[in-house]
Image (tube, grey):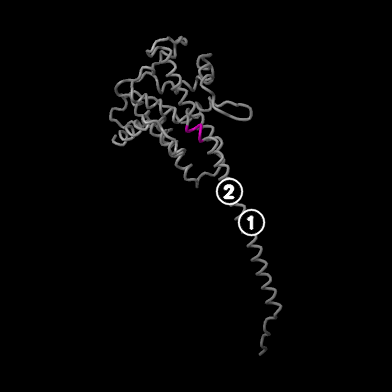
């Protein structure tokens, strides 16, 4: 019987060379893949951080402005400046008296509508810029999206009123796509930058032709505020939810920014009342 000859040393050398080469190639390939993915993740984080820096201040400022107005509305509800006839008449001239004249109340109503629309406009600009970024692993963005979702729900969700006689309550909604449309209506181009329309231009359009596109969406916001009822008006509960969400948002994005004492007091009071409800 013929005894097989032992493997040649050259066979071992070839196998070792192939293994080494394959390992080197796989190592390089994995290194390139890992580096490429790490670089893309780094670029995404940088882009996300840049968007936060770009939009943080205007979102926080408009959130606080709207929160202050909602705080006032909740404290004085039903306040005298949320009356629809104020918008139906020609702009009145201001008086020199100290009372809340028609001019002042009309201003308060228009600026209330503007504050909501401007906040939604900054949210819409942020949403449009962030839509192609991977934000799933960013903790702050997840918290921000949660607060924004609560805010939009307070405007849009009919089921929030859980009273047995909910059909007898006054209410008004701004649906989610209408919120976006209202925000889009206030976005304008300034040079190479998109910004939110200022209050002066907003009021000029409101006082202009009735068929102006902006007025179609402003009507949704107007309906959300005007002609409050002293009893069984669920919009007051919605304002309270919005107030809490706006303060939560401001404290998340700028935790060191001081808030006015009355706003913090109203925030705590409203939050406790909603929790108890």
* SS assignment at label 2: helix
- The image quarter containing residue 101 is top left
Q: Residue at x 33, y 30 (%)?
A: 161
> Where in the figure is residue 220, as x and y percent of width and height?
45, 23
Q: For residue 32, which numbered disc appears in the image?
A: 1
Residue 66 in percent (x, y) is at 43, 27
Query: Measured from the top left, where is residue 96 in percent x and y?
Result: 42, 10
Please report the bounds of the magenta region as a residue range. Answer: 56-60
**Which quadrant of the figure has residue 166?**
top left
Residue 24, how many percent across, how many down?
Answer: 66, 65
Which is nearer the eye, 201 or 237? 201
Q: Main secondary structure of the magenta part?
A: helix
- Residues packed near mark 2 inside 10 Å, few (<14), some (14 to 19) or many (20 plus): few
Position of residue 196 in the picture relative to residue 191 (left or right): left
> Magenta includes 21?
no
- Disc 2 designates what residue? 42
Asked whether 58 falls inside the magenta stretch, the response is: yes
| Residue toward you, 111 or 232 | 111
- Left of 264 or right of it: where is 49? right
């Amino acid at each position: 019987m013929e005894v097989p000859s032992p493997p040649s040393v050259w066979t071992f050398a070839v196998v070792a060379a192939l293994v080494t080469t394959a390992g080197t190639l796989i190592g390089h390939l994995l290194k390139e893949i890992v580096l490429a993915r790490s670089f893309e993740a780094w670029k995404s984080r940088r882009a996300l951080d840049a968007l936060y820096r770009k939009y943080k201040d205007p979102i926080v400022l408009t959130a606080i402005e709207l929160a202050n107005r909602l705080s006032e509305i909740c404290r004085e509800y039903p306040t005298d400046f949320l009356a629809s006839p104020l918008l139906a008449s020609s702009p009145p001239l201001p008086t020199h008296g100290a009372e809340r004249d028609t001019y002042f109340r009309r201003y308060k109503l228009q600026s209330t509508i503007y504050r909501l629309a401007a906040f939604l406009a900054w949210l819409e600009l942020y949403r449009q810029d962030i839509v192609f970024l991977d934000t799933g692993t960013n903790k702050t963005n997840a918290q921000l999206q949660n607060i924004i979702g609560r805010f939009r729900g307070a405007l849009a969700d009919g089921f929030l009123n859980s009273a047995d006689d909910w059909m007898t309550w006054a209410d008004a909604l701004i649906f989610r796509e209408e919120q976006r449309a209202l925000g889009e209506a206030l976005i304008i181009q300034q040079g190479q930058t998109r910004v939110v329309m200022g209050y002066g231009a907003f009021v000029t359009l409101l006082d202009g032709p009735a068929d102006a596109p902006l007025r179609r969406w402003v009507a949704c916001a107007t309906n959300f505020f005007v002609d409050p009822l002293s009893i069984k008006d669920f919009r007051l509960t919605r304002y309270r939810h919005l107030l809490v969400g706006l303060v939560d948002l401001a404290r998340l994005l700028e935790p060191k920014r001081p808030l006015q004492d009355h706003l913090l007091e109203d925030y705590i009071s409203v939050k406790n009342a909603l929790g108890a409800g």
